[in-house]
Image (cartoon, rainbow, N blue to C red):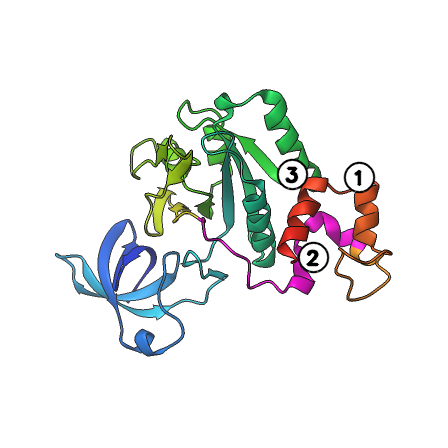
Amino acid sequence: MQKGIIISNISNLYKVEVDGKIYDCNARGKFKNGETSPVAGDFVEIEIIDEEKKAGVINKIEERINYLKRPKIANLSQIILVISMKLPKPDLELLDKQLAYAEYMNIKPIIVLNKVDLEDAEVINSISEIYEKIGYKVIKTDAKKGIGVDELKENLKNKITAFSGNSGVGKSTLINSLLGESVTEEGLISYKNKRGKNTTTQVKLYKIDEKSYIADTPGFSTFDINEIKKEDLAKYFIEFRPYITDCEYVDCSHIKEKNCGIKKALAEEKISKERYTTFEKLSR
């Protein structure tokens, strides 16, 4: 048996990397009837059927650190949340949803503000300050010019990292810049409606070095956080946490109640109005 990592799968064919070699593998029938099916990021044991043709069979999936259902990927160390400063415009509501989900899954998030050349520094800094104040790491990039790419690459060492964000924000361009070659198809922007056309249709891991991988994932235009109970949502807006215990009622919704610790913190500008507005929308 050989141990490796699944770097991609199309239908029932999995590409597994073992010591730098890529094997095309099928999964044993036992996975078809069970709840666990192999996905990108899984560490697996394979039986090599044909070394010359680089063919094998997946016999075992190692225990996962974590698992995301959409997109399907396992064992993430962190997630890079990419938003564009323009073309398309910043979607901060989506970013807040993704941050809440990352906290729920206990996966470290890093925020990347891409296409900084297209927006005024004042606007960029105002967004950056909201999230840096909370405690999130924010990296400003211009993928096509290589600005911020070295700083981003330093944060990927010895980790499996997923890149997430709406179509057209520059995920594929960033990945190409990080790897120094065009390994993904760069997204095209429709100038008619200023929205990205999604070009990534599957999760695929790209190797940076011996222990570092990055994942290009499908766009999150349908991203939702239905796994999080609405009564628990406030816990995953991390700057809200210190004020939850100040609420008069244990089951406080943090919206209608008068003696609410979070609403008091909002009034005292201890939490941002923008983030609270997103929370309010998601709590409906």
Q: Is residue 170 visible?
A: no
* Type of amino acid under label 3: Tyr
- Please state which of the two labelled residues, at mark 2 or mark 1, is closer to the viewer: 1
Crowd around label 3: few <14 · some 14–19 · many ≥20 (10 Å): some
Amino acid carrying mark 1 in the image: Glu
Instruction: Tell me where the magenta segment starts and ends, as one range.
Output: 220-243
Numbered label attached to residue 235:
2
The residue at which mark 3 appears reads as 131
Mark before the other along the chain sequence, 3 or 2: 3
Q: Nearer the viewer, residue 13 or 171?
A: 171
Please rate how many residues cluster around mark 1, counting C-alpha atoms within 10 Å: few if below 14, some from 14 to 19, many from 20: few
Q: Could you tell whether 105 is left or right of 230 in the image?
A: left
Task: Please state the horizontal and vertical placement of residue 220, each as a whole percent of the image.
Answer: 45, 49
Provide the residue designation for mark 1: 269
Distance from disc 3 to disc 2, alpha carbons, whole Å, reads 16 Å
Whole-angstrom CA distance, mark 1 to mark 3, is: 14 Å
**Lateral position of residue 182 relative to residue 135, left or right:** left
Q: Are dots 3 and 2 in contact, CB under 8 Å?
A: no
Callout 3: SS: helix
- Mark 2 residue type: Lys
Question: Is 99 above or below relative to 51?
Answer: above
Image check: 274 left or right of 69?
right
- At x 37% / y 77%, what residue is drawn? 34
Image x and y of residue 150, in percent = 47, 29
Q: In the picture shown, does residue 200 fall above or below 73?
A: above
